[in-house]
Image (cartoon, grey):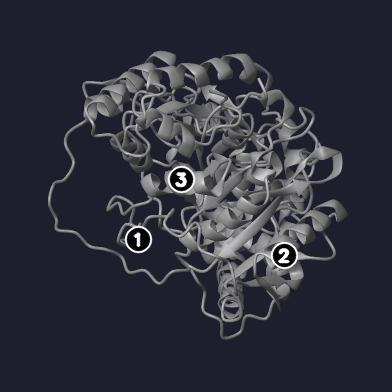
Amino acid sequence: MNLATTSLRQLAQALQARQISSRELAEAYLGRIARLDPGLGSFITIDRERTLRQADAADARIASGTAGPLTGIPIAHKDIFCAQGWLTTCGSKMLSNFVSPYDAHVIEQFEAAGALILGKTNMDEFAMGSSTETSFYGRVKNPWDPTKVPGGSSGGSAAAVAARLAPAATATDTGGSIRQPAALCGISGIKPTYGLVSRYGMIAFASSLDQGGVVAPSAEDLGIVLNTMAGFDARDSTSIARPAEDYTAQLDKPLQGLRIGLPREFFGGGVSADVERAIEAALQEYERLGATRVEISLPNTALSVPVYYVLAPAEASSNLSRFDGVRYGWRASRYEDLGDMYERSRAEGFGAEVKRRILTGTYVLSRGYYDAYYLQAQRVRRLIVNDFKSAFAQCDVIMGPSTPSVAFGFGEKTSDPVQMYLSDIFTISVNLAGLPGLSIPAGFGEGGLPVGLQIIGDYFSEARLLNVAHRYQQATDWHARVPALANV
Amino acid sequence: MALTENDLRHLARLARIRVEDDETGPMLAQLSGILGLIDQLQAVDTRGVEPLAHALDLEQRLRPDEVTETDRREQFQAVAPQVEAGLYLVPKVIE
């Protein structure tokens, strides 16, 4: 079985038909990882024995006739999800010794479904970054070009799936961390509506924005995985209680009459010509599928970046105060007193970007600045949400580029944090509004690097978004292209 | 607004992060860049706009006041830097 060209759905069928066992499948993926990942760096932790034990249990379950759609399928998990018995680092030195004593809700869901944990993927430290360069565990190379970044913060998950080292991987998205790396690595990725996937056991960065999701080669595979991942969880106070939905049920629905909103602010200045060309070609494909274009405006798009860089650091400075070297995580080896122990443990355990965000958050929440920054940002956040509400009165989905350019080089944006922040200009507003968004491959730009098409939907329209993506993927084959190194 | 070295030291103190002398220069430059970015918000007219904390109008759920967790102290303390007799150890704070 050629893992570079077999979809998750096909793997599931092969398992059910006993053409392959879960153990054979797990060994095949672990073998690919052993051969290819030393050159990519997409995984932080692999635990072969643990994965194979799960595979044997899955094989027994398949034999007993009680298997579900994901039973026996290996899934890679972003190292932000706590998994009992697994080192869970969140990309940080702070958690370099943290073997989780419990499972995230998402991990519980996959365990119940009989899926295997294939390994834990590399990421920007505490999910703060857009290139995975802030990880304590080394750089992740873009499988399409080893001199380019994979995007971030879910860069390990995206690179692993792009190189077909995993059929799918979990990821999280606070300002674009699923959609941007999916775009730069030429795969599909969905960030669901805020509240659809439980944040319990998902290490917190900015709680009003963080949302778990999936990356996989195709929209169909995203839907299969999301069916297991989504669901109400009372332990997450913002989890949303909704009847279970089959995200694959509408995949084949025709797109005749679909109104695609094109925000003026997502086109023109600020988008590189190669990306714009690929997006235009994708839009023409959608017209052939029966969709029509509607020009819309999201006038406050440019303000989404400054709003985000007030609110996310503010929430992060609060969330990350738990890392104090007392209950878990890194503790400095030498200190004078309790205060010194906190300060040295945090100085040693956190990297430069995390410190910048904590300090920024501390600043905007401090006396005298709270109203001017924090409350003002929350007011502008409402303006951004209202922009989307008006837009969805005129269209069914919104489309545009996921990123302003194709993958950039290592070190290109690390010296100026603001340049790095601006690479998320098209994705951030979606988190501020809590809307679902996905990115799918839409051809190639400069240097043969992938371009991502972003599709944004109204609240809880995941099934519709996946349908819109799937029909495009039935008409094109961009999602089936794999980088040369994956063809082994 | 320009950030001074004193401001930075104050913030670092509030955030409980030790900053070494040779780190302050680059940190100040980068934080000033970030503050320049977020200062764009000052020019936006938001009169009459209510601050928004959460995009979906959610109400805080309540649950019966019952014990739902089991005692897993040993497992949770297994990952702590220093424990003794079920207690987390820190440097002495009271003489």
Label 3, label 1: how many angstroms apart (C-alpha)?
18 Å
Q: Which mark is residue A240?
A: 1
Residue type at numbered disc 1: Ile
To the question of a shared chain for discs 3 and 1, the answer is yes
The chain letter for the residue carrying disc 2 is B
Say which quarter of the image contains residue A484.
Answer: top right
Q: Which residue is mark 2?
A: B39
Q: Chain of mark 3?
A: A
Q: Amino acid at mark 2?
A: Asp
Q: Position of residue A85 (x, y in %)?
A: 35, 23
Q: Could you say which quadrant of the image residue A433 lies in?
A: bottom right
The reply to whether callout 3 and callout 2 are in contact (CB within 8 Å) is no
Q: Residues within 10 Å of mark 1 (few under 14, many from 20)?
A: many
**What residue lies at 85% left-to-right and 38% top-to-bottom?**
A447
Q: Quadrant of the C terminus of chain A?
A: top right
What's the amino acid at mark 3?
Ala
Label at residue A204: 3
Per the model, the C-alpha gap separating discs 3 and 2 is 26 Å
Q: Is residue B72 left or right of residue A22?
A: left
- Secondary structure beneath disc 1? loop
Kindly report which numbered mark, 3 or 1, lies closer to the viewer in this rendering.
1
Question: In the rendered image of this protein, does residue A403 appear above or below residue A17?
Answer: below
First along the sequence among labels 3 and 1: 3
Residue A34 shown left or right of residue A411 in the figure: left
| Mark 3 crowd level (few <14, some 14–19, many ≥20, 10 Å Cα) | many
Q: Nearer the viewer, mark 3 or mark 2?
A: 3
